[in-house]
Image (cartoon, grey):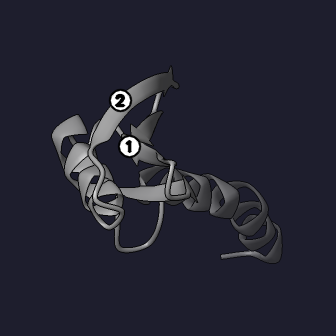
Amino acid sequence: MSDSNRTLATTVLAPLVLGSLAACTPLVWGGTYHAVEKSPQSITVEYENSLTSRDTVLVYASEHCGRYAKRAALADIDRNPRTELLRFECR
C-alpha cells in the first residue's frame, strides 16, 4: 500500500469505523441503563429502549425507592430516538 493510500485509509476509514462502533456501544459500559439523578424523593433513569425494557427500569426504580420505605410511581417520560428518560417519584 502506498503512503497516499495509507493516509486515505487512516483519515477517512478510521473515523467511519470508530463512529460505527460508538453507535453500537451501550449507554454505559456494562449496562443499558443508569440513574441520572437520585434522591429520597425521586429517581430519574436513562435507558436504551431497544436493549432494556421499562419493566427492568421499574424494578431498578422500585429498589431505589424501597430503600426509603416508599414505592416508585412513574411521573414523567422523555422519549428520544434511541433512549428514554423515566422519572419516578418515591411515594
Q: Residue at x 28, y 37 (%)?
A: 50
Q: Check disc 1 and report its element: helix, strand or loop.
A: strand
Q: Is residue 91 left or right of residue 52?
A: right
Q: Nearer the viewer, residue 22 or 13?
A: 22
Q: Is residue 17 left or right of residue 28?
A: right
Q: Residue at x 80, y 69 (%)?
A: 7
Looking at marks 1 and 2 on the same chain, the residue that comes earlier in the sequence is marked by 1
Q: Nearer the viewer, residue 76 or 34?
A: 76
Q: CA distance from mark 1 to mark 2?
A: 17 Å
Picture disc at residue 20:
none
Q: Residues within 10 Å of mark 1 (few under 14, many from 20)?
A: many
Q: Residue at x 65, y 64 (%)?
A: 14
Q: Nearer the viewer, residue 3 or 44?
A: 44
Q: Determine whether 42 is above or below 25 in the image.
A: above
Which residue bears the numbered disc 1? 48
In the rendering, at what x and y percent does residue 6 appear? 73, 72
Quadrant in which the N terminus is drawn: bottom right
Q: Determine whether 77 is above or below 8 in the image.
A: above
* Labels 1 & 2 near each other (Cβ < 8 A): no
Q: Residue at x 76, y 61 (%)?
A: 8
Q: Is residue 52 visible?
A: no
Q: Nearer the viewer, residue 77 or 75?
A: 75
Q: Is residue 11 left or right of residue 73?
A: right
In the rendering, at what x and y percent does residue 49 appear? 33, 36
Q: Is residue 61 visible?
A: yes
Amino acid type, mark 1: Glu
Amino acid type, mark 2: Leu
Which residue bears the numbered disc 2? 74
Q: Check disc 2 and report its element: helix, strand or loop.
A: strand
